[in-house]
């Protein structure tokens, strides 16, 4: 069985008897074990939740503004330049 992933981590859940019965019924209806059904459902939901943090869509005009902002040269921030001249917390006052 090449390609089979070994699952070694465990996740325990506390549920109401009603929630457990519903998950068992749904797993049975989809011809999966409860573990397979819950894991697959949770992974789909996790992907949906995390997708909003890694991808975004813009209308064409806003996309062009976004690209222009990415391509623009960085602006001068004097306070930030001064900060980079100060020794870091692990440099013990040593200048490069």
Image (cartoon, grey):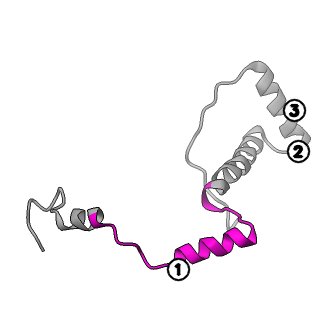
The residue carrying mark 2 is 30
Residue 25: which disc? 3
Q: N-terminal of the two: label 2 or label 1?
A: 2
User: Could you say which quadrant of the image residue 39 lies in?
Assistant: top right
The magenta stretch spans which residues?
Answer: 53-78
- Residue 65 % position (x, y): 63, 72
Task: From the viewer's side, name the closer residue of 77 and 9.
Answer: 77
| Residue at the image position 59 percent from the left and 38 percent from the top | 11
Circle 1 Cα neighbour tier, 10 Å, few/some/many (<14 / 14–19 / ≥20): few
Q: How many marks?
A: 3
Question: Image check: 15 left or right of 86?
Answer: right
Q: Which image quarter holds the N terminus?
A: bottom right
Please tell me whether residue 73 belongs to the stretch shown in magenta.
yes
Classify 9 as above or below 58.
Answer: above
Label 3's element? helix
Task: From the viewer's side, name the closer residue of 34 and 69.
Answer: 69
Which is closer to the viewer, label 1 or label 3? 1
| Residue at the image position 10 percent from the left and 70 percent from the top | 95
Q: Residue at the top extreme? A: 17
The residue carrying mark 1 is 71
User: Could you say which quadrant of the image residue 4 lies in?
Assistant: bottom right
CA distance for labels 1 and 3: 54 Å
Circle 2 Cα neighbour tier, 10 Å, few/some/many (<14 / 14–19 / ≥20): few
Classify 78 as above or below 14.
Answer: below
- Residue 51 % position (x, y): 66, 56
């Amino acid at each position: 069985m090449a390609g089979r992933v070994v699952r070694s981590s465990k996740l325990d859940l506390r549920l109401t008897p009603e929630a457990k019965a519903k998950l068992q019924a749904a797993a049975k209806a989809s011809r999966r074990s409860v573990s397979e059904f819950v894991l697959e459902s949770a992974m789909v939901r996790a992907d949906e939740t995390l997708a909003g943090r890694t991808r975004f869509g813009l209308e064409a005009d806003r996309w062009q503004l976004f690209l222009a902002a990415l391509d623009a040269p960085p602006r001068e921030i004097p306070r930030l330049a001064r900060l980079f001249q100060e020794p870091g917390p692990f440099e013990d006052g040593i200048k490069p």
